[in-house]
Image: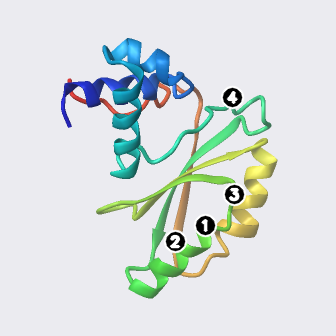
Amino acid sequence: MDEIDLRILRELQEDGRLTNQELAQRVGLTASPCMRRVRQLEQDGVIRGYRAVLDPEAVGRGFEVLVSVEVKRDRLAVEAFEAALQDIPDVVEAYRLFGSPGCLLRIAVTDIGAYERLWIDRLTSLSGITEVNSQIIMKRIKEPRGLPVGR
């Protein structure tokens, strides 16, 4: 990737709805070469997709919790846990970590009652779980804005 590709990535992370013409102008290209570069970045898997960023409150998911989970240090237990997470839409992000805790989840639900039901009905009932700790998010200080590229 050269500097133009990096500028394309920065611009698209800032506004994924830019037209090709607008993007080309911003990065100093004409439309055709800009489109070829974007398509190549997509084909290479550098650009994995495009999404709308939603306001959690507006869609009834304003209560967010970070949950640390310990899972038995057993391959089958870990694989079963990770597979089960795929079927819980309230878990909006999940990471396996080195060390302790073994996993970190970000959960978005309506309110504390909804989280309690999820905690009781789904999280603590998953096989292989040895511990679940919750930290309620008070305030989001920095929004995800994409990855820093080339600077």
Q: Quadrant of residue 125?
A: bottom right
Q: Which residue is mark 2?
A: 82
Please state, as top left, top right, bottom left or bottom right, where the N terminus lies in the image.
top left
The kind of residue on which mark 1 rests is Gln
Element carrying mark 4 = loop
Residue 89 is marked as 3
At a point 48% along the width and 24% down the height, the residue shown is: 20
Q: Callout 4 environment at 10 Å: few (<14), some (14 to 19), or many (20+)?
A: few
Q: Quadrant of residue 35?
A: top left
Q: Is residue 119 above or below residue 47?
A: below
CA distance for labels 3 and 4: 17 Å
Please provide percent x and percent y for residue 108: 67, 45
At a point 59% along the width and 67% down the height, the residue shown is: 85
Q: Is residue 141 visible?
A: no
Residue 86 is marked as 1
How many labels, in total? 4
The kind of residue on which mark 3 rests is Pro
Q: Which residue is mark 4?
A: 55
Element carrying mark 1 = loop
Element carrying mark 3 = loop
CA distance for labels 2 and 3: 13 Å
CA distance for labels 2 and 1: 7 Å
Q: Callout 1 environment at 10 Å: few (<14), some (14 to 19), or many (20+)?
A: few
Specify which label sits upstream in the sequence, 2 or 3: 2
Left or right of 29? Residue 59 is: right
Q: Quadrant of residue 26?
A: top left
Q: Callout 3 environment at 10 Å: few (<14), some (14 to 19), or many (20+)?
A: few
